[in-house]
Amino acid sequence: FGWICVVLALVFGLAMFTYRHVNYVPKYTAEATFTVSTQNSSSIGGVSVYSFYYDSATANQLAMTFPNILDSNLLYDAIHEDIGAMSASASLSASNVSGSNMFTMSAVSTDPKIAYDVLVSAIDNYPQIAKYAIGNVKLEMITAPIMPTEPSNSTAYRSAVLKAMILGFVLGCFGVNTVQQSS
């Protein structure tokens, strides 16, 4: 009856592969990284002098306020005005590199061009909108956005199929063992 364990392992593995293949939706991520600096103004001899300094707290605050800016629809409306209805099929997020003044903005979509276009529009519009929440900030791009060529989410076929096969094998062995003990 050992063949039952092997057959169930193969059936479970094939079922998982089919399930993953049918339900897989590729997601493409476009990203850009910036350094953040804030503007200070002072007066020297009656002349206003503006200076920017790098500020990790501001980068953190930008990442924290990003969801609020999206919830207020200001940035979404600006992006929608730039590129139209296709911006609705992308999601934006932001994060900061802990303890630094670096800030990463990303757009995720099922279409690589939409992800790229939404990110570029967000980069163009974000400083004007963030000014209301944070004040004068200056974003210096470190890593420019590029059009994604490969999905950022993996199918993970190998590990999912292997787990399903192990489960099928164990259930088959447990079933065979139970039947043998009851006879």
Image: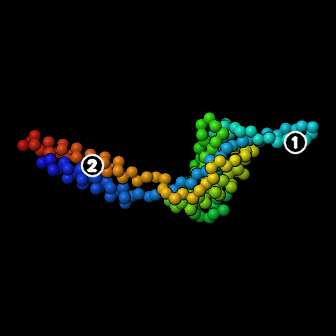
Q: Position of residue 19 (x, y in %)?
A: 34, 56
Amino acid type of the residue that numbered disc 1 sits on in the rendered structure? Ser
Identify the residue shown where x is 65% and y is 58%.
121
Q: Element at badge 1?
A: strand
Q: In which quarter of the image is the C terminus?
A: top left
Give the CA separation, mark 1 to mark 2: 71 Å
Residue at the spot of label 1 = 48
Which of the two residues, 111 or 148, is positioned nearer the viewer here? 148
Amino acid carrying mark 2 in the image: Met
Instruction: Mark 2: give few (<14), some (14-19) or many (20+) Cα within 10 Å.
Output: many
The x, y position of residue 41, in whole percent, is 82, 40
Residue plotted at (85% across, 41% down): 49
Mark carried by residue 165: 2
The secondary element bearing badge 2 is classed as helix
Looking at the image, is 99 positioned above or below residue 31? above
Q: Are marks 1 and 2 in contact (CB under 8 Å)?
A: no
